[in-house]
Amino acid sequence: MPYIKTRDGTDIYVKDWGSGRPVVLVHGWPLSADSWDPQALALAEAGFRVIAYDRRGFGRSGQPWSGYDYDTLTDDLSDVMTAAGADRDATIIGFSMGGGEVARYMSRHDGKGLVSAGLIGSVVPYMLKTDDNPDGVPEEQLQQIAAGIKKDRAKFFADFFKDFFGVGYVTSPVSQETLDWAWRLAMQAGLKPTLACAESFGHTDFRGDLPAFRVPTLVLHGTEDKTVPIDASGRAAAAGIANAQLVEYDGAPHGLFATESDRLTRDLLAFLGR
């Protein structure tokens, strides 16, 4: 099942590994499903069926002009789960931007078929700094992301991934080869999807979606995350979700799937095994 077609006709690339209870992994911006590979391999080897897909506009999926709002992106998630037959006894786990699809799935699709959920370095509940969200990211900073991408996307992402993986401020930064790999994944995406998704994750308020979480939810976040600050995201999400378990990775940056890969895998396996 390398591709499924969504309800609006977009081709979505899907990786389907292993067998057992389904775990659906939703990647972050501006990457692809490949960013989940170490965790996907470990979960599949542990007896889970792992489904990871490239968000529309990214990786090997189609790049339509529209559909980068969270309602449409979450409908894509629902379509992938239905097409894969993974909408029973499932867990969905979203990293960074992907946490928004998890939250919106809870409200828009009533958490259909889920037994648990995970938010890893997630943008939930609200990234933007406002009077009632003082720990968020200032609008000017979000606008600088768009401006940098439009001016020189290749240079912007070369710099972006240094903060993403904590280069220069964590004790175990990733290799230059990992930085190069992430840059290549980012450059696979279309310019329109890249900009439109940045607008969506920066300005979508998920606070109203939090009461729709009715399953055990694991929230993992690095305390030194400079890309998605923990106070406005991980800590706030855990406080607003009933039956949430917050695990803080002390001193860790945003890209936990690489910088804390083994620990992240262990924590996911422990959570899924409960």
Image (tube, rainbow, N blue to C red):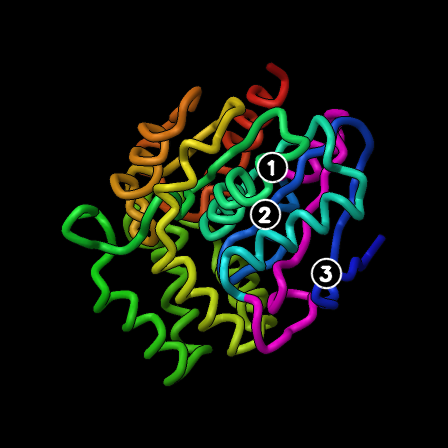
Q: Could you tell me the amino acid type at mark 3?
A: Arg
Residue that numbered label 2 is attached to: 26
Q: Earlier in the sequence, mark 3 or mark 1?
A: 3
Q: CA distance from mark 3 to mark 2?
A: 18 Å
Magenta residues, start to end: 39-67
Can you give x and y, in whole percent of width and height, for residue 51 in the image?
Answer: 72, 43
Measure the alpha-carbon separation of dots 3 and 1: 20 Å
Between label 3 and label 1, give the one nearer the viewer: 3
Pick whichever, 268 or 243, lies toward us.
243
Report the Cα–Cα distance between label 1 and label 2.
7 Å
Disc 3 + disc 1, Cβ < 8 Å: no
Residue 111's x, y, as percent? 59, 35
Please give the label number shown on residue 92: 1
Q: Is residue 258 visible?
A: no
Q: Are marks 3 and 2 in contact (CB under 8 Å)?
A: no
Q: Nearer the viewer, mark 3 or mark 2?
A: 3
Q: Nearer the viewer, residue 103 or 22?
A: 103
The answer to whether 21 is drawn above or below residue 221 in the figure is above
Q: Which residue is mark 3?
A: 7
Q: SS at mark 1?
A: strand
